[in-house]
Image (spheres, rainbow, N blue to C red):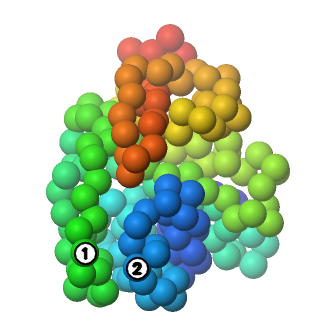
Amino acid sequence: MIRPATTEDSHHIAKLIYEIWEGMELPLLRAYPKATVQTGLSLVVSDSFNKFSHRNILVKADEEGRAVGIVICYDGAAESELHERLLAILHASFLDMPLEMEQETQPGEWYIDALCVDQEFRGMGWGTQLLAAAEQWGAAQGHSRISLNVERDNGGARRLYESLGYEETGGLTLVGHEYAHMIKKVGKGSSEG
């Protein structure tokens, strides 16, 4: 079942965000204990307005209702404000070093910031289901352009996104890694809707 995240999901979502950050090799993960970072991320998810707020997350739940997959998305026009609030919460919780992130999206885009499925549940198509749900959510919000970034050396993910209709529109560097910025047109103004 895919459903909106709640504050009760914060602990499980924090673990998945941590896993995403491990893949990005964020320097703060070497500076703080895992439990400290995950506690800070739980606070972020419980908050009502920031990049990783539960209000910006859909979860794939297992049979017990536990969040085992997530997709985080929001209006690209709000990225800067959402990021500032995220930093404020992390700084109040534990962070005493800079955590600057490059601009990842643009106004006019429904941005898929992160997608992650617990390792135990990978290969079951849940990531694709979450992606489709995020696209539908964005279209329902009036967005006709869905965007995401994929690491250039992640050929498997890139092929998946291309097969789903995403096209590269540019590139960017995030935390020292090269990414392709990809966009899919949905809803009004797209060839599909």
State yes or no: discs 1 and 2 in contact (Cβ < 8 Å): yes
Q: Is residue 54 above or below residue 133?
A: below
Q: Is residue 71 above or below residue 9?
A: above
Front residue of 159/131: it is 159
Q: Which residue is mark 1?
A: 97
Quadrant of the image occupied by residue 119: bottom right
Q: Quadrant of the N terminus?
A: bottom right
Q: Which residue is mark 2?
A: 31
Taking the view exactly as shown, the residue that stands out farthest to the top is 191
Q: Position of residue 79 (x, y in %)?
A: 25, 49
Q: Position of residue 111 (x, y in %)?
A: 39, 41
Q: Which residue is rendered at x = 79% and y = 61% of the image?
A: 121
Q: Position of residue 165 (x, y in %)?
A: 58, 21
Q: Is residue 61 visible?
A: no
Q: Is residue 12 visible?
A: yes
Element assignment for label 2:
helix
Element assignment for label 1:
loop
Q: Which residue is rendered at x = 78% and y = 72% of the image?
A: 63
* Residue type (three-letter) at the residue carrying disc 2: Ala
Q: Position of residue 108 (x, y in %)?
A: 26, 31
